[in-house]
């Protein structure tokens, strides 16, 4: 972690978005345990210890995959009450390496003009799709320069 972010985290250890970014960085580096621990802390900053505890328990019992499945369930419940972008679901299914479901959700995100599509090439969770022509088509339709 860069010295600026480290200093910011030291001065604001309960900054949800900084913790979220740190967890994302850990995940991208393959540091799943650290990602889950940081997310648990982030959820607690929102006074949502329940989600944090569920995340920690899922990880302890089934590893990172179980934690992602728990988040997927949480977002599905949330989507019954408010709009949730298909790109959020795509990011989670990509972490689970669910090829067809991830592509379908990315296509749905494209159809809905989701601005979240602009970041998918930066997330290594999608790396397994780079050789798929459907993924490449989505990148092209969005107008992004390919990074695969």
Image (tube, grey):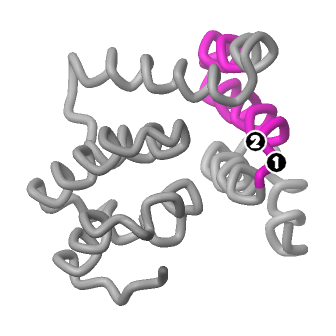
Above or below: residue 124 compared with residue 4: above
Locate the N terminus and report the quarter of the image it occupies: bottom right
Pick the front one: 30 or 75 = 30
Which residue in the protein does label 1 denote? 31
Indicate which label's residue lies in the foreground, 2 or 1: 1
Residue 104 is left or right of residue 8, and the answer is left
Q: Secondary structure at mark 1?
A: loop
Residue 84's disc number? none
Image coordinates of residue 117 in percent, x first then y, are: 31, 64
Q: Please give the name of the residue rendered at 73% of the width and 54% of the height, measured from the top-left corner.
A: 22
Q: Please give the name of the residue rendered at 35% of the width and 89% of the height, measured from the top-left corner.
A: 145
Does the segment drawn in magenta span residue 124? no
Image coordinates of residue 116 in percent, x first then y, are: 33, 60
Residue 72 is left or right of residue 81, and the answer is right
User: Principal SS element in the magenta part?
Assistant: helix
Q: Mark 1: few, some, or many residues within 10 Å (few <14, many ≥20)?
A: some
Q: Please give the name of the residue rendered at 61% of the width and 50% of the height, measured from the top-left corner.
A: 17
Tell me whether the residue at label 2 lies in contact with that at label 1, contact meaning CB atoms closer than 8 angstroms. Answer: yes
Q: Please give the name of the residue rendered at 23% of the width and 80% of the height, measured from the top-left corner.
A: 140
Image coordinates of residue 85 in percent, x first then y, are: 26, 43
Above or below: residue 129 compared with residue 81: below
Which residue lies most toward the bottom here? 145
Q: Which residues are magenta?
A: 30-55
Q: Quadrant of residue 21?
A: bottom right
Which residue in the protein does label 2 denote? 35
Pick the front one: 24 or 41 = 24
Image coordinates of residue 9 in percent, x first then y, are: 82, 55
Q: Secondary structure at mark 2?
A: helix
């Amino acid at each position: 972690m860069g010295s600026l972010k480290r200093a910011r985290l030291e001065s604001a250890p309960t900054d949800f978005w900084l913790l979220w970014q740190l967890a994302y960085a850990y995940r991208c580096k393959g540091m799943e345990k650290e990602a889950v621990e940081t997310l648990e802390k982030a959820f607690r900053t929102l006074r949502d210890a329940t989600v944090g505890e569920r995340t920690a328990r899922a990880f302890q019992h089934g590893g990172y995959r179980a934690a992602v499945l728990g988040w997927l369930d949480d977002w599905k419940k949330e989507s019954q009450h408010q709009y949730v972008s298909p790109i959020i679901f795509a990011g989670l299914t990509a972490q689970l390496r669910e090829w067809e479901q991830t592509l379908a959700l990315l296509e749905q995100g494209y159809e809905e003009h989701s601005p979240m599509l602009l970041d998918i090439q930066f997330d290594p969770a999608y790396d397994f799709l780079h050789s798929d022509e459907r993924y490449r088509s989505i990148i092209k339709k969005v107008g992004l320069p390919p990074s695969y």
